[in-house]
Amino acid sequence: MNTQPQNDGNNGLLIGLIAGGVIGAGLAVLFAPRIAELRQRVKASATDLSHAAAQRYQEVSTRVAGVVDEVTARGQTVRDDVADAVSRGARQVEQIAMASKTGRPPRQS
């Protein structure tokens, strides 16, 4: 009879787990500074991108405000020109109407 305990491969599993843990810990120590450095670079890049986007937004907002002001000024000028033309036309119509009632030719302005 065999009095030695039977080993159903449990020792191999235990050795594999221990070796995997040691290798994993070694890799974690090896790559940990690089991950921290990468995280810092990503954070810096995100901050730079955020600042650049904010600056571009400000520039575009300023340009749009300038264009809106210019278009508004032009629109007001056109409105004033149309109002003047309508006023002149109304005076001419009034002069023609008065001239037709009195029989005199209308005055030229």
Image: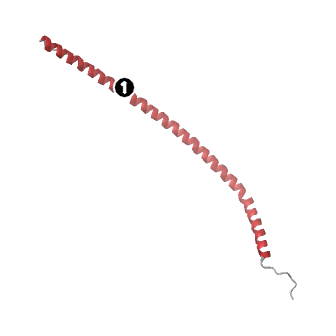
Residue 18 figure quarter: bottom right
Q: Residue 51, relative to residue 9: is it above or below?
A: above
Which of 86/78 is in front? 86
Give the side of residue 39 with respect to residue 56, left or right. right
- Residue drawn 73% across the image and 62% down it: 27
Give the side of residue 101 with respect to residue 43, left or right. left
Which of 2/80 is in front? 2
Residue 70 figure quarter: top left
Residue 109 visible to an observer of this rendering: no
x, y percentage for residue 65? 46, 32
- Circle 1 is placed at which residue position? 76
x, y percentage for residue 81? 31, 23
Q: Residue 53, relative to residue 81: is it above or below?
A: below
Q: Residue 11, relative to residue 102: is it above or below?
A: below
Total residue callouts: 1
x, y percentage for residue 26? 75, 63
Q: Amino acid at mark 1?
A: Gln
Residue at the left extreme, as displayed: 103
Give the side of residue 109 with respect to residue 28, left or right. left
Residue 58 visible to an observer of this rendering: yes
- Residue drawn 19% across the image and 15% down it: 95
- Residue drawn 58% across the image and 43% down it: 50
